[in-house]
C-alpha cells in the first residue's frame, strides 16, 4: 500500500506526537545509532580513495533515498501510520517555524555550548543520548544561521536553478561538477561563505551543530531535510521527462573516477541495489 510523506508544517498534533514517539522508540531499541554509523562510514569525500556513494557522487540521491526508506521502515515497525515528513526550507525559514516547535524537534542550541534544551530530543529528557559522533558530547547541538559567520537558508530561486538543469550529472562526477542537477542540488560550490554551500549543503550548515559532517544523522532534522531533497529529485524527473540517472555506464580504466562512482546499473553498497531500481518510488510512497 502506497503511503504519503507530508509537509511537516501540515502535520496535526497527533501526527507530530506519533512521529516523535516512533523516533524515540527506534532510538531506544538501538537501531537509530546504526543509521548514524552507516552514514559516517559512507561519508567519503573527493580527496579520499575508493568508492564514493553517499556524497560528492552521482549516487547521492538514490543512496539517501534508500537510507530514508530504511529509517521509514524502522519507524513503521513501531507505528504503521508514521512516515517521514519533509521540511520545505524555502518556506519555513525561521527558528520559530516548523519543524522547530516544542512538540516536534525542539529549537536552537543555547549560546554557551549549543546544547538543544527544548523539545523531546533535548538531553535533559534522557531519551536522546548521542553515542556516535566525532566529539565526546552526549547532547544534541545546533547553531542556527552560524552567528559568527552568518548564512541564510537557500531560497526558492536557488532551488529552482538546480531544478532547471536538464542533465542529471556531469563529469567529473564529484564535488567540482559545475553542471548537472545532482551537484547543484547537493550544493558543492566554490569560493567562501554562502557561495561555497548551496541548497542541501547550506541547510546542513545553517542548522549547525551535529548537522555538520558525517554524524549529521544524530539530529532528527536530517531526515526531514533529506525527504525534501528526495522530493526535488521527483520534481526534477517530472519536469525533465525521460531524463535518467547518469552515468549510464561506469567510467573506464583511464578515467580518474574509475571504480570511484556508481553507474546506473551497478550495485550500491551497503544494500547491493542499483540507482536504476530507485528512480521510481511511486509504488512505495508519494508526496502531499
Image (cartoon, grey):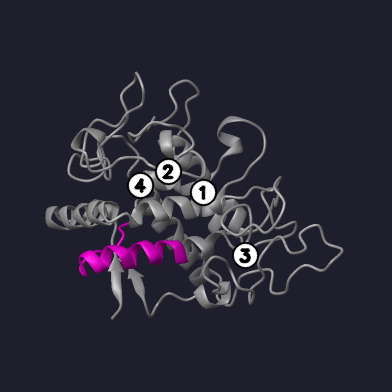
Residue tagged by mark 2?
Answer: 132
Magenta span of residues: 66-85
Q: Are marks 2 and 3 in contact (CB under 8 Å)?
A: no
Residue in the foreground of this view, choosing between 82 and 244: 82
Badge number at residue 40: 1
Q: Can residue 154 be spotted in the picture? A: no
Quote the CA–CA distance across marks 2 and 1: 9 Å
Residue tagged by mark 4?
Answer: 221
Quote the CA–CA distance across marks 4 and 3: 26 Å
Mark 1 or 3: in front is: 1
Q: Can residue 184 be spotted in the picture? A: yes
Q: Point out residue 117 in the picture as x, y percentages from the top left corner.
A: 24, 30
- Measuring 59% from the left and 63% from the top, which residue is drawn there? 59
Picture layout, residue 266 above or below residue 60: below
Helix, strand or loop under label 2: loop
Q: Point out residue 242 in the picture as x, y percentages from the top left corner.
A: 58, 77
Quote the CA–CA distance across marks 2 and 3: 33 Å
Other-residue count near label 1 (Cα within 10 Å), few / some / many at <14 / 14–19 / ≥20: some
Residue tagged by mark 3?
Answer: 168
Other-residue count near label 4 (Cα within 10 Å), few / some / many at <14 / 14–19 / ≥20: many
- Measuring 44% from the left and 40% from the top, which residue is drawn there? 211
Other-residue count near label 2 (Cα within 10 Å), few / some / many at <14 / 14–19 / ≥20: some
- Measuring 30% from the left and 34% from the top, which residue is drawn there? 95
Amino acid at each position: 500500500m502506497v503511503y504519503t510523506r507530508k509537509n511537516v508544517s501540515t502535520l496535526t498534533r497527533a501526527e507530530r506526537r506519533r512521529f516523535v514517539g516512533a523516533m524515540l522508540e527506534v532510538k531506544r531499541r538501538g537501531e537509530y545509532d546504526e543509521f548514524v554509523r552507516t552514514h559516517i562510514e559512507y561519508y567519503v569525500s573527493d580527496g579520499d580513495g575508493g568508492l564514493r556513494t553517499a556524497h560528492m557522487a552521482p549516487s547521492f540521491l538514490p543512496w539517501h533515498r534508500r537510507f530514508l526508506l530504511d529509517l521509514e521502515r524502522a519507524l513503521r515497525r513501531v507505528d504503521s501510520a508514521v512516515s517521514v515528513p519533509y521540511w520545505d526550507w524555502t518556506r519555513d525559514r525561521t527558528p520559530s517555524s516548523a519543524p522547530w516547535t516544542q512538540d516536534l524537534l525542539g529549537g536552537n542550541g543555547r549560546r554557551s555550548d549549543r546544547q538543544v534544551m527544548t523539545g523531546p530530543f533535548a538531553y535533559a529528557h534522557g531519551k536522546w543520548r548521542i553515542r556516535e559522533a566525532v566529539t565526546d558530547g552526549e547532547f544534541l547541538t545546533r547553531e542556527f544561521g552560524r552567528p559568527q559567520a552568518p548564512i541564510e537558508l537557500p531560497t526558492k530561486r536557488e532551488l529552482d536553478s538546480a531544478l532547471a538543469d536538464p542533465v542529471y550529472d556531469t563529469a567529473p562526477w564529484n564535488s567540482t561538477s559545475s553542471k548537472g542537477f545532482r551537484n547543484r542540488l547537493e550544493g558543492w560550490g566554490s569560493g567562501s561563505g554562502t557561495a561555497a554551500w548551496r541548497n542541501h549543503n547550506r541547510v546542513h550548515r545553517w542548522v549547525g551543530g551535529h548537522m555538520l559532517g558525517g554524524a549529521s544523522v544524530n539530529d532528527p532534522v536530517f531526515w526531514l531535510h533529506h525527504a525534501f531533497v528526495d522530493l526535488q529529485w521527483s520534481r526534477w524527473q517530472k519536469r525533465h521527462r525521460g531524463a535518467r540517472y547518469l552515468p549510464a555506464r561506469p567510467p573506464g580504466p583511464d578515467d580518474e573516477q574509475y571504480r570511484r562512482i556508481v553507474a546506473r546499473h551497478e550495485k550500491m553498497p551497503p544494500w547491493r541495489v542499483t540507482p536504476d531500481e530507485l528512480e521510481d518510488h511511486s509504488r512505495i510512497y508519494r508526496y502531499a
